[in-house]
Image: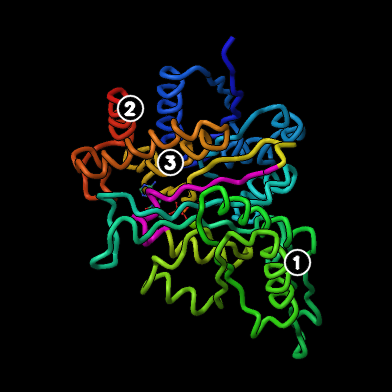
Amino acid sequence: MSKTFKIAVIPGDGIGPEVINEGIKVLQKVAEQSDFQFEFTHFPWGCEYYVEHGKMMADDGIEQLKSFDAIYLGAVGYPGVPDHISLWDLLLKIRKEFDQYVNIRPITLLKGAPCPLKNVKREDIDMLFIRENSEGEYAGAGDWLFKGKPEEVVLQTGVFSRKGTERIIRYAFETAQKMKKSVTSISKGNALNYSMVFWDQVFEEVSRDYPDVPTYSYLVDAASMFMITQPKRFEVVVTSNLFGDILTDLGAALAGGLGLAAGANINPERAYPSMFEPIHGSAPDIAGKGLANPLAAIWSASQMLDFFGYEQQGRMVLDAIEQLLVEKEVLTPDMGGTASTSEVGDRVVELLNNR
Ligand code: ATP
Ligand code: MG
């Protein structure tokens, strides 16, 4: 019996179902050519579900997802349902309950992908962002004092635990060591005099366990500049939740835009399922029209293959995306083409045929 991976599919809202469809097509094709298979189970959770049931997912949703090998998520969000509900009651809940403390975002400029910088070569932009995904500035800690009074004060506290900081930095070093790349830490120790001083200290401590891995450390302001002027400096990058959020959007713009930006939420211990998703949202403005670019969702499917240990197959999918970008014949309108979402998915499948 060949290995079967059980995938929980949450297509979600807006363009989510459209792009996830194409990702599934691609995964099916890869499985057909390999010695494993996928079993997909769909969950109709999201904002439409919320409108009907008053909640984003079933009460025992987390329990239901627990036994899967991975979660494949489209996007959640809908005009009329407040972001804090759609985000906190589904996406962030899954990330938290399944301790997906690593957020991996590849910032790789594929050949043929649009880039706003002039005279860059493909190999100049090839970074792997490893963003802390469980605490930091997004821990939700703070206070709102004297609300509405003249002496009103609002506190937003970053929470950096020893365990949380060490494990994300260690994950970056482990990854870089395997890839024979450097690790760059991005922080702000000169202004954030508790959290980032601590971050820098832990980075320094952990780095001693990896004498063979070259390390760099930049302030976040300088790093934002270098990402544009000298992107080649960055290979594996480790940073906090907030800085990672901002810098990976900057990175997405460098490497072809939202239509190509993929992300993975990983629980490295594999105690719980990890989750793979395009980083774009539900894009209600183009939903249901076949205009959505499925390449980000397909790229996150390739990350899923990597995570399962099928790196050669993951690479094949990425190569097919790259070939499609180079050909420039079958592209969605956001990339200047006229093809539909499913035509792009079909073309990726066709290109996989020839590999
Ligand atoms: P959400 O509220 O779920 O975050 P959003 O309206 O913010 O949704 P995003 O998906 O974050 O939308 O992206 C902003 C815009 O970028 C969209 O409105 C859409 O026009 C465009 N866009 C995003 N993703 C894609 C895609 N995969 N293909 C084509 N265009 C896209
Ligand atoms: Mg959005």
Earlier residue among tags 3 and 2: 3
> Mark 1 packing: few (<14 Cα in 10 Å), some, or many (20+)?
many
Q: Amino acid at mark 2?
A: Leu
Q: Position of residue 172 (x, y in %)?
A: 61, 56
x and y percentages locating residue 144 in the rendered image? 78, 76
| Left or right, 170 with reference to 347 | right
Label 3 Cα crowd, 10 Å radius (few <14 / some 14-19 / many 20+): many
- Asked whether, in this view, residue 328 is left or right of residue 211, the answer is left
Q: Is residue 248 magenta?
A: no
At label 2, counting other C-alpha atoms closer than 10 Å, the crowd grade (few under 14, some 14-19, many 20 or more) is many
Report the span colored magenta.
252-268
Q: Earlier in the sequence, mark 3 or mark 1?
A: 1
The residue type indicated by label 1 comes to Phe
Q: Amino acid at mark 3?
A: Trp
Q: Disc 2 marks which residue? A: 352
Choose top left, top right, bottom left or bottom right for residue 308.
top right
Q: Is residue 19 above or below residue 203?
A: above
The N terminus sits in image quarter: top right
Q: Is residue 191 above or below residue 34?
A: below
Q: Nearer the viewer, residue 354 or 324?
A: 354
Q: Is residue 203 above or below residue 197?
A: above
State whether residue 98 is above or below residue 169.
Answer: above
Residue at the spot 68% in from the left edge and 70% down from the top edge: 204
**Helix, strand or loop under label 3:** helix
Does ligand 2 reach within 8 Å of label 1's beta carbon?
no
Q: CA distance from mark 2 to mark 1?
A: 43 Å
The residue that disc 3 covers is 299
Check the image and name the residue furthest to the top: 1
